[in-house]
Amino acid sequence: MPRFKSDHVPTYRLHKSTGRAVVTLNGRDWPLGEYDTPDSKQRYHALIARWLAGNRAPLNEAEVVESNRAIDRTSINVNDLLDARKRQLEKELPEATLKAELGRIGGATAHLRELYGTSPACSLSPLKLKAVRERVIQHGYVRKTINHYVRYIIEAVKWAASEEMISASIYEALMTVEPLKRRRSYPDE
């Protein structure tokens, strides 16, 4: 006699000893992350869908890891990305230049944080970068500083793509934003 009905779907549950979310498929516990979070529930639904699509056969661990990596990319917001970049620079840069560099980057990313800080990092686009640039223009910065700020943002996104925090296609899309050219609507120096 089968232990479960054929339509039984294993439940999302708390693993008491670790305090993390888990689901048991084919006798194996699959960790889902922090319990009762949107990310862990998204992982649960993705895992169940994959398991059911495979006729309830045991899952391939490498495919699950790659699927979780894709989910992780969608859960990172812009503030998380910028904070991770700041931590990396703190490790890389010598103490003598760290404060000045972090000040420049902080100024460059402040407007991005205000407009899109809680948005998913994977939603960054050329139009959003142009909106940030327009906001910097409205605050009266000169063309050279505005272009530097945009370049700092693009460099942060490039770093995040190299760390597989976000898709490289986001960096490639942001690279299509042209620097400001000389014109009369904003100061040159």
Image (spheres, helix red, strand yellow):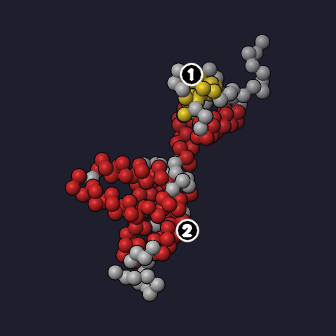
Q: Residue 86 location in percent, x, y?
A: 37, 52
Instruction: Quadrant for residue 23, please give it.
Output: top right
Answer left or right for 56 relative to 175. Answer: right
Residue at position x 62%, y 20% in the image = 27
Answer left or right for 4 relative to 166. Answer: right
Q: Residue 141 location in percent, x, y?
A: 40, 75
Q: Which residue is mark 1?
A: 16
Residue 61 vs 96, above or below: the answer is above
Q: Secondary structure at mark 2?
A: helix
Residue at position x 53%, y 44% in the image = 72
Residue at position x 58%, y 30% in the image = 21
Q: Residues within 10 Å of mark 2 (few under 14, many from 20)?
A: few
Front-most of residues 150 and 6: 150
Residue 90 vs 32, above or below: the answer is below
- Give the residue at the far bottom of this rendering: 184
* Picture quarter with the C terminus: bottom left
- Give the residue at the far left of this rendering: 96
User: As shown in the figure, which amino acid type bears the numbered disc 1?
Assistant: Lys
Q: Residue 42 location in percent, x, y?
A: 63, 40
Q: Which residue is mark 2?
A: 127
**Alpha-carbon span between mark 2 and mark 1:** 45 Å
Q: Which mark is residue 138?
A: none
Q: Is residue 162 visible?
A: no
User: As shown in the figure, which amino acid type bears the numbered disc 2?
Assistant: Leu
Q: Residues within 10 Å of mark 1 (few under 14, many from 20)?
A: few
Answer left or right for 126 relative to 110. Answer: right
